[in-house]
Structures are given as structure tokens and as C-alpha cells.
Image (spheres, helix red, strand yellow):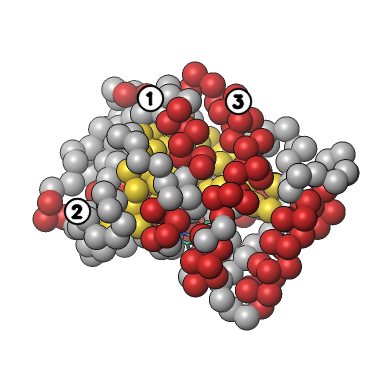
């Protein structure tokens, strides 16, 4: 993770411009659905997007990042909960259990799902289980095509061109040296990863394809039940599963986790939550 630690020193400033168009489009498209929404921002970085999401009306944003210095830059806001955690298989299950037991309306991986192969697929499966009915996963990965990534579409020199060229070079070097993994993607590759994770879902482009990222989304049917999906994924019968449309946003309600069940310990940056408690489900 020290590659990300290094990048946290300049990220907020450099990331702001690059992020803005994506964030404004996402907020524009989700519109009123953001009102009161519970969002897991996975690999939130310095929280530029998290801040915009609460400003747009999100009810709660769980800003998750492995790097303490990134989390320190996340805006202090009563509706932003900072969680220091490495996103890997099981992390989002723990977040669901300890932080948002009623699930999420949006799980966002904005330039953060850099994991390879099956690891990424399993993380996406956890994200799917975390979703409330009608909720969605949005994944944005740097476009594999370097011209597209650096110059956008239509191709021209952009405010982010130099930064993206530098970023691609450094990230490839870091990946090669095993400092941290870095994954780029085409739309087709991203769709195939999402289909492997959630065969029943149909990946769809959520944002206009002008961005230098491949962005796709999968959405849970509004009449799905979370407990049913969790039991299915765990190979267990649907113990106490709720059928029908429950209260907020149609979510299946579950009791908040008790402090004994591996609740957040409060370590990490000030006012943040960490997931250091062991979770037997993970
Ligand atoms: C390119 S930045 C993107 C930040 C933010 N999502 C944005 O688009 O502005 C990637 C972020 O993901 C975090 N990250 C990468 N891999 C991670 C992992 N396995 N677990 C937790 N955070 C991770 C890094 O620390 C970094 O803050």
C-alpha cells in the first residue's frame, strides 16, 4: 500500500479535476435517488466524491480506504463515516455487519477495484450482497486504451492529459514492481468481470462513454431480498429471510450488530471507524 500512501500526498489536488466530471455526471444521473441514500465509497481516496455525494443529498456515505492519510483528507461531515480497511474478500461483508446493517443503495468503486481476477469478482459478490433491493454497484476503471485515457473522447488535449500519462506510467511501474496492483479495463472486460460476479445481472453503461474511464453498473431488482441473496451465497438456507418489500428503500431490515460481534474499534484516523474486529463470516 505504500504506493497509495505516496500518492495520498498529492492526490486531493490532482484528483479533484479528474474526478469532477465523473462525479457531476453520476450525481446528475442518479438525481433524486441519491436523496437519503446509503453509499459505500470503496477506495474513497481523499473523499472528494464522498463530499459531493453528501452535498447532493446522500443520507450516509461510508468512505472506505486502506490509507490513513487519504482518510484524514476526507471532509468531516456528520453523514460521512470513515472506515479504514483494506478492501478484499470479506471486507464489505464486515462493513455490512458492523456499519450499515440495513445495506447500501450504492456501492461505488471509482478507480479503486484494481484487484486481479477472482479477487475482484469475489469483492463484487460481497458488494452485491450488501445492496438493498433496487441498489446498484458502479465500477469505474481507468480505460485500458491509453489514448482514450489520456485524451478522452473526442480525442484532444485535456486538463488531465499530462496527469493521466504520468499516472499510467507510474501505476504500471508500481504494478510491475508489485508495489500495488493496478488494473485498467475496456468496457467489454469490465462487463465480463461483472457478469462473472453476478451472472443474473445485466451490466449497463450508466454514464455517457466520453469519460476516460470504463464505467458500468449492475442493479439489484427492486423486489429482491438481501437476506435471500446472502444465504444463497453462503450456501445456507434462508434463515429468517424477509420476503416482500421492506421499509426504507425496500430494504430487508436486519438488527444492528451487537458490540460483541466485531463492531468497529475506533482505531485509525480521528473519528474514523476501523474494521479490525474479526468476523466469523469473512
Ligand atoms: C486512484 S485513487 C481513487 C480515489 C477516489 N475513488 C477517486 O476516484 O477520487 C485509489 C484509492 O483506492 C485506495 N485503494 C486501492 N486499493 C485499495 C484496497 N485494496 N483497499 C482499500 N483501499 C484501496 C487507495 O488508497 C486510493 O485512495
Under tag 3, what secondary structure? Answer: helix
* Residue at screen point 66% across, 78% down: 176
What crowding class fits label 3: few (fewer than 14 Cα within 10 Å), some (14-19), or many (20 or more)? some
Under tag 1, what secondary structure? Answer: loop
Q: Position of residue 161 (x, y in %)?
A: 78, 51
* Residue at screen point 56% across, 41% down: 138
Spatial CA distance of label 1 from label 3 is: 16 Å
Q: Position of residue 15 (x, y in %)?
A: 60, 49
* Residue at screen point 19% across, 53% down: 263
* Residue at screen point 73% across, 63% down: 166
Residue occupied by mark 1: 36
Residue 275 visible here: no
Q: Residue furthest bottom?
A: 177
Under tag 2, what secondary structure? Answer: loop
Work out whether mark 1 precedes mark 2 in sequence or the reverse, and give the earlier one.
1
Point out the image quarter for the C terminus.
bottom left
Spatial CA distance of label 1 from label 2 is: 24 Å
Residue occupied by mark 2: 263
Q: Is residue 163 left or right of residue 261?
A: right
* Along the viewing direction, whichever of 225 and 64 lies nearer the viewer: 64
Work out whether mark 1 precedes mark 3 in sequence or the reverse, and give the earlier one.
3
Residue 100 occupies quadrant: top left
248 to 159, vertically: above or below: above
Q: Is residue 152 left or right of residue 280?
A: right
What crowding class fits label 2: few (fewer than 14 Cα within 10 Å), some (14-19), or many (20 or more)? many
Residue 228 occupies quadrant: top left
Residue 15 visible here: yes
Amino acid at each position: 500500500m505504500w504506493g497509495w500512501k505516496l500518492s495520498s500526498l498529492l492526490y486531493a489536488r490532482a484528483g479533484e479535476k479528474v474526478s469532477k466530471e465523473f462525479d457531476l455526471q453520476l450525481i446528475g444521473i442518479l438525481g433524486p435517488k441519491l436523496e437519503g441514500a446509503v453509499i459505500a465509497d470503496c477506495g474513497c481516496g481523499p473523499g472528494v466524491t464522498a463530499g459531493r455525494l453528501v452535498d447532493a443529498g446522500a443520507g450516509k456515505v461510508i468512505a472506505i480506504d486502506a490509507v490513513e492519510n487519504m482518510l484524514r483528507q476526507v471532509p468531516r461531515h456528520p453523514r460521512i463515516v470513515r472506515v479504514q480497511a483494506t478492501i478484499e474478500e470479506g471486507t464489505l461483508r464486515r462493513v455490512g455487519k458492523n456499519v450499515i446493517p440495513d445495506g447500501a443503495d450504492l456501492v461505488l468503486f471509482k478507480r479503486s477495484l484494481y484487484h486481479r481476477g477472482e479477487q475482484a469478482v469475489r469483492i463484487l459478490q460481497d458488494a452485491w450482497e450488501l445492496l438493498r433491493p433496487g441498489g446498484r454497484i458502479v465500477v469505474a476503471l481507468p480505460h485500458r486504451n491509453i489514448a482514450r485515457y489520456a485524451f478522452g473522447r473526442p480525442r484532444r488535449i485535456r486538463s488531465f492529459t499530462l496527469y493521466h500519462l504520468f499516472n499510467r506510467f507510474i501505476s504500471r511501474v508500481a504494478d510491475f514492481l508489485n508495489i500495488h496492483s493496478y488494473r485498467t479495463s475496456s468496457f467489454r472486460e469490465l462487463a465480463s468481470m461483472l457478469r462473472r460476479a453476478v451472472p443474473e445481472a445485466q451490466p449497463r453503461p450508466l454514464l455517457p462513454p466520453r469519460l476516460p474511464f470504463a464505467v458500468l453498473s449492475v442493479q439489484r431488482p427492486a423486489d429482491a431480498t438481501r437476506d435471500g441473496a446472502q444465504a444463497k451465497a453462503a450456501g445456507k438456507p434462508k434463515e429468517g429471510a424477509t420476503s416482500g418489500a421492506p421499509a426504507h428503500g425496500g430494504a430487508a431490515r436486519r438488527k444492528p450488530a451487537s458490540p460483541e460481534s466485531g463492531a468497529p474499534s475506533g482505531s485509525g484516523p480521528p473519528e474514523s471507524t476501523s474494521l479490525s474486529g474479526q468476523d466469523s463470516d469473512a
